[in-house]
Amino acid sequence: MDTIEYGGISTSRAQRAAGLARLACGKRAGRTHLRRLYQDGSAKIRMPAVATDPLEAVLINTAGGLTGGDRLAWEVDVGPGGSATITTQACEKIYRAASDRAEVRVKLTVGDHGSIAWLPQETIVFEQSAFARTLEVDLADGAEALVLEAAVFGRLAMGERTTRGSFHDRWRVRRQGALIHAEDFRIGPGIADALGRRAVAGGAVAMATILMVSPRAEALLQSVRGIIGDQGDASAWSVTTSGKLLARLYAGDGYQLRKRLVPLVELLNGRAGLPKLWSL
């Protein structure tokens, strides 16, 4: 069968959905402006009108969700001195997979003294779904990043519970080629059993990881811990020429998780605050 390639992901024409979108922006005349935009398949990018930095971009999967065999790739390049906030139009839904798994690949590149805030809305994981996501971040000298990923394993308010499936999240963050953060979160096939363990989530079904790479990271640690309360924790370190803050949160449902994520993003994203779609 003929194959096509999206951002390094090989996929056949018979698969349900495939898409690749690339955005490049940079600083010009005191503002961050779009330089290049490429879209193919089910991956689309739209940019709300903003009067000041950062440039804001909204990712849209026109397939309306992902299931086994679907492939998406997002690539964002922020030039030196530029700043961008990236979010999604809605929560991404990972549906039951009859075979294979859905895959998403994200690549973020930030030039000297630029900044990026990767703030997608939550990923909702349905029963017997299969999903793998790879996130790669390459930072130049003086570049900053705020990275968030949140997942909800079953919408309890709608009577949905995710008991079985496969979920894998892989992060690699580098500064000037040197690895400064790496993690792999993998759960399944017994998702509910694993989440029910006290050492894992104690029965919580919603969780989030936030990573901040910035000289401001350590100074914000106590404020971050105050927002999280007893629903997670945060730590801060010095990494190469910058600081790093890592926070993990969990909650009984997506609504309770969002109540903490909103003030956290407002705090960590500085003057940019929340993406416009988060406040709708």
Image (tube, rainbow, N blue to C red):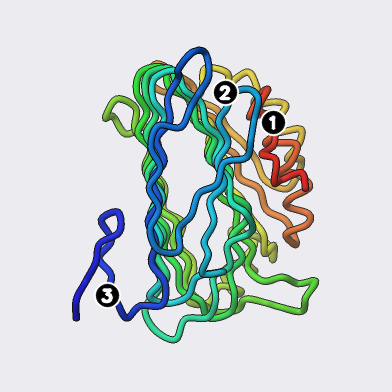
| Label disc, if present, on residue 201 of the rendered structure | none
Instruction: Read off the residue under disc 2.
Output: 217
User: Quick check: marks 3 and 1 in contact, CB under 8 Å?
Assistant: no
User: Quick check: marks 3 and 2 in contact, CB under 8 Å?
Assistant: no
Q: Nearer the viewer, mark 3 or mark 2?
A: 3
Q: Residues within 10 Å of mark 1 (few under 14, many from 20)?
A: some
Residue found at the far top of this picture: 29
Image quadrant where residue 98 sits: bottom left
Instruction: Read off the residue under disc 3.
Output: 12
| Label disc, if present, on residue 273 of the rendered structure | 1
Up-down relation of residue 274 to residue 257 (above or below): above
- In-image side of 128 versus 262 (left or right): left
Instruction: Tell me the SS state at disc 2.
Output: loop
- In-image side of 229 versus 31 (left or right): right
Q: Disc 2 residue type?
A: Ala
Q: CA distance from mark 3 to mark 1?
A: 40 Å
